[in-house]
Amino acid sequence: MRYRRSDIAGGTYFFTVNLCDRRQHLLVEQADRLRSSIARVKARHPFTIDAMLVLPDHLHAIWTLPQNDCDYAMRWMLIKAAFSRGVDKNESISVSRQIKRERGIWQRRYWEHLIRDENDYARHVDYIHFNPVKHGYVKRALDWPFSSIHTFIGHGVLNRDWGGEPDNDGIYGER
């Protein structure tokens, strides 16, 4: 069976994209390279980044594509390739990747979810912004430097105290 991705032109999507070796911290160590890779692709193939978070081994993003465009897969391929070209070749590369002349930096697949409504959007934005607290990198969402939460706070959408420690249920923004 062939996996079929959602392909709604002009859609808003949530993504999780992982490094192959989840023990690496490459995404934060090379954050400027990732940022410039995204900017180059975005300049040639426009899209809006609604929210984004970069952790050491994976990232989460919400993108909105142009009205006549549904090709987020091409954008991710270009971003991954641009980022990978600038990274030293010292990763372990499987035989199947060698045959296809692929690097071993990124997982081949990624998670995508078509945002369905305002509530779905809000839940995924909260999930993105709370993720560094959930993973134990910081105690407050505001303290993680590689997050769009700073833009949300700057625009008055969120308060500076948003995303502290989890509530009594141990859950925050993940219901």
Image: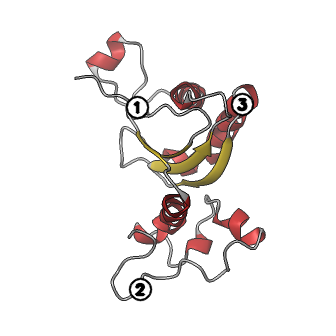
Residue tagged by mark 2? 167
Q: Nearer the viewer, residue 11 or 57?
A: 11
Q: Nearer the viewer, residue 116 or 46?
A: 116
Residue at left offset 73%, top offset 25%: 44
- The answer to whether any part of residue 143 appears in the image is yes
In the image, 57: left or right of 44?
left
Task: Give the structural element (helix, strand or loop) at label 1.
Answer: loop
In the image, 155: left or right of 140?
right
Task: Give the structural element (helix, strand or loop) at label 3.
Answer: helix
> Split into 4 quadrants, where in the image is the N terminus?
top left
Give the percent coordinates (x, y) of residue 128.
51, 60
Residue tagged by mark 1? 5
- The answer to whether any part of residue 16 appears in the image is no
Task: Give the structural element (helix, strand or loop) at label 2.
Answer: loop
**Of the two numbered discs 2 and 1 in the rendering, the one whose residue sits closer to the viewer:** 1
Disc 3 and disc 1: Cα gap in Å? 24 Å
| Outermost top residue | 99
Disc 2 and disc 1: Cα gap in Å? 35 Å
Q: Residues within 10 Å of mark 2 (few under 14, many from 20)?
A: few
**Of the two numbered discs 3 and 1 in the rendering, the one whose residue sits closer to the viewer:** 1
Residue tagged by mark 3? 40
Dividing the picture into quadrants, the one containing residue 156 is bottom right
Labels 3 and 1: the sequence-earlier one: 1
Residue at left offset 58%, top offset 25%: 78
Tags 2 and 1 touching, CB below 8 Å: no
Q: How many marks?
A: 3
Q: Amino acid at mark 2?
A: Asp
Disc 2 and disc 3: Cα gap in Å? 40 Å
Residue at left offset 66%, top offset 74%: 158
Give the percent coordinates (x, y) of residue 153.
71, 71
